[in-house]
Amino acid sequence: MKYHVDFDIDLKHNPYKGLYIAFEGIDGSGKTTQTELLTRYFRNKGKLVLQTREPRKEGLIGDIVQRVLIGKLKISSVALQYLFSTDRVLHHEDIIIPSLNKGKIVISDRCFWSAIVYGILDRAKGQYSSKNADFLLVAHSILSMYHQFIVPDYTFYLKISLETATKRISKKDDFKEIYEDKEKLKQVIGGYSWLVEKFNREIIVIDGERSIEEVTKEIIDKLT
């Protein structure tokens, strides 16, 4: 028996005096680089800045997540999403919210938007489509763990092609993560396209194919 289920969700926006900025995109899109450059830009202006990332690489949960991502520890993909959420709760409670409350600028390499894209991908067993994304968003309550988190004031999605992503990832010196194979990257790109369409008022699309300097300039222009 099939039932139609629909719902609206009220995202939790930043109530604090600090500014919350996040970068989203597939691996190789330049999130880490732009996080570092924007942090440097604001610090040069004398602002108090917290640079961070999700998931974290340190701490009890962060260490486990990192070992899973680089293939040193195996758990189910759904279980991994719960670990992401646990780490995010601790991250917000211990670091992000106190920093925003003090008026700091928080700049994050990924935020809860990633959890929606990758969470749906994992629950759909790698078969991403707008139809099953809409279904899973409701039926499996993908947002139930995430609507409690503050939505960034600015979320920049660095959009690049599959070809560009694979080329950049191939140049990495460190461990290849479990989501960095070509087929998964292709599905994640589809996931971000769906996310941008679904939440178009929350996410700013930036052409990540351009030079680092051009991307940084556009981001700063959007913030000023």
Image: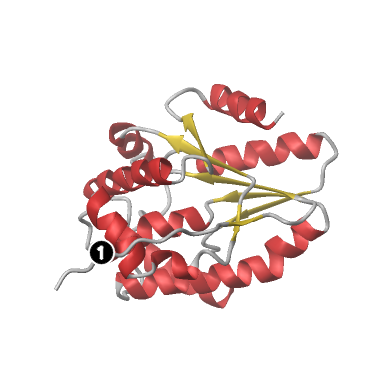
Residue, disc 1 = 4
Q: Nearer the viewer, residue 211 or 11?
A: 11
Query: Where in the figure is residue 199, as x and y percent of width and height?
Result: 46, 45
Q: Nearer the viewer, residue 175 or 8?
A: 8
Query: Amino acid type of disc 1?
Result: His
Q: Is residue 118 left or right of residue 202?
A: left
Q: Nearer the viewer, residue 213 or 100?
A: 100
Q: Is residue 38 left or right of residue 98?
A: left
81 in relation to 109, above or below: below
Q: Nearer the viewer, residue 121 or 34?
A: 121
Residue placed at 82% from the left, 52% from the top? 103
Circle 1 Cα neighbour tier, 10 Å, few/some/many (<14 / 14–19 / ≥20): few
211 in relation to 79, above or below: above
Query: Where in the figure is residue 59, as x and y percent of width and height?
Result: 59, 73
Asked which quadrant contains residue 212, the reply is top right
149 in relation to 130, above or below: below
Residue placed at 50% from the left, 23% from the top? 211
- What SS does tag 1 mark? loop
Residue placed at 43% from the left, 74% from the top? 82
156 in relation to 209, above or below: below
Q: Quadrant of the N terminus?
A: bottom left
Q: Is residue 38 left or right of residue 178?
A: right
Query: Where in the figure is residue 165, as x and y percent of width and height?
Result: 35, 38
Q: Is residue 27 visible?
A: no
Q: Is residue 1 left or right of residue 11?
A: left
Query: Where in the figure is residue 55, as x and y percent of width and height?
Result: 51, 62
Residue placed at 30% from the left, 74% from the top? 76
